[in-house]
Amino acid sequence: MSAFQTTLLILIISIIVSFLYGLFTRNYSTVDRLWSILPPVYVLVWMKDFQDNPRYVIAAILVIAWGIRLSLNFARRGGYGFEWGKGFTGEDYRWEIMRKKIPNRFVFEIFNLLFISAFQLILVFAITLPLYTVGQINAPLDAADLLLFGLHALFLILETIADNQQYRFFSERDSAEFKDSPRHRLGFNTFGLWKHSRHPNYVCEMAQWVVVGLYAMRLTGQPVSLAGAAVLVLLFAGSTNLAENITLSKYPAYPEWRRVSVPWVTLPGVNAKKKNEFLKSIKT
């Protein structure tokens, strides 16, 4: 069995496990637990064929670093929580909401098979697949490669900063020390990178996989290398809309913050006056 066939087998097994675990336990976050693990596994399996390709090795190391970072962040938020006799206890809040939107159990399990398990895990494979193409083309490194490596590392660092800022905010928000802080009482983060984007972690996540697609596209000239990343952006757009609707119902000031801020990326100075006026108003 080739390395590529091995990763296809891993993908198929992952889909089956995700579907069956959700079917029998009604915990549908197996896909969330696998999301950060499978890309590093894929690139490590392919590594035996491409270990002499420096472009592949460097890009693979960055993907492995992404997987370690995301797994650690997921773990500290309880994503891998486990109890004997109960199994995994952590579950993404969106699946509970989707269960309410799709109350028919049979229909929901079809949704579990086709979207939660199959579609999402195939997408994880698709966004990693450009690196397999990269591995097959052992051309000399050039300035464009260095630029892409730098961007990949930059987005990884910024995502780490954004997640740490979010984790710190929620830890502080629920502590006695910050109970009188107006910005903490808002309930949502307006500090650091979160002042400039409502979802800086998502922006950096998507950007990293666009870069992975660009690794392959610049070698082949085929835009199809960006197909997985494009679908990922659409998935994040839908997921963000769901998350923001939940936030709107939880925090009274969020509609105003949504009006003066941006969901993804803003240029320096854009809406700065409106945001500063909003932040100043909550202190009075």
Image (cartoon, grey):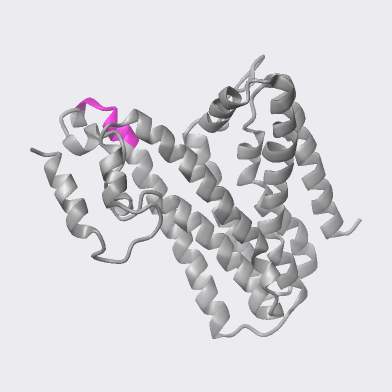
> Looking at this rendering, what residue extends furthest in the top direction?
85
**Of 64 and 96, which appears nearest the observer?**
96
Q: Quadrant of the N terminus?
A: bottom right
225 above or below 274?
below
Q: Residue furthest left?
A: 284
- Name the one closer to the observer, 262 or 40: 262
User: Percent position (x, y) of residue 190?
Assistant: 27, 45
* Residue that appears at 12% across and 46% down: 280
What main secondary structure does the magenta stretch of the protein show?
A: helix
In the rendered image, residue 191 lying in the magenta stretch gets the answer no
Place residue 54 in its image quadrant: bottom right
Picture layout, residue 56 above or below residue 230: below
Quadrant for the C terminus, please: top left
What residue is rendered at 53% in x and 78% in y? 146
Residue that appears at 60% across and 54% down: 232
- 46 on left or right of 94: right
Q: Position of residue 231 (x, y in %)?
A: 62, 56
Q: Is residue 22 left or right of residue 5?
A: left
Residue closer to the observer: 234 or 221: 234
Q: Which residues are magenta?
A: 170-176
Residue 174 sits inside the magenta stretch: yes
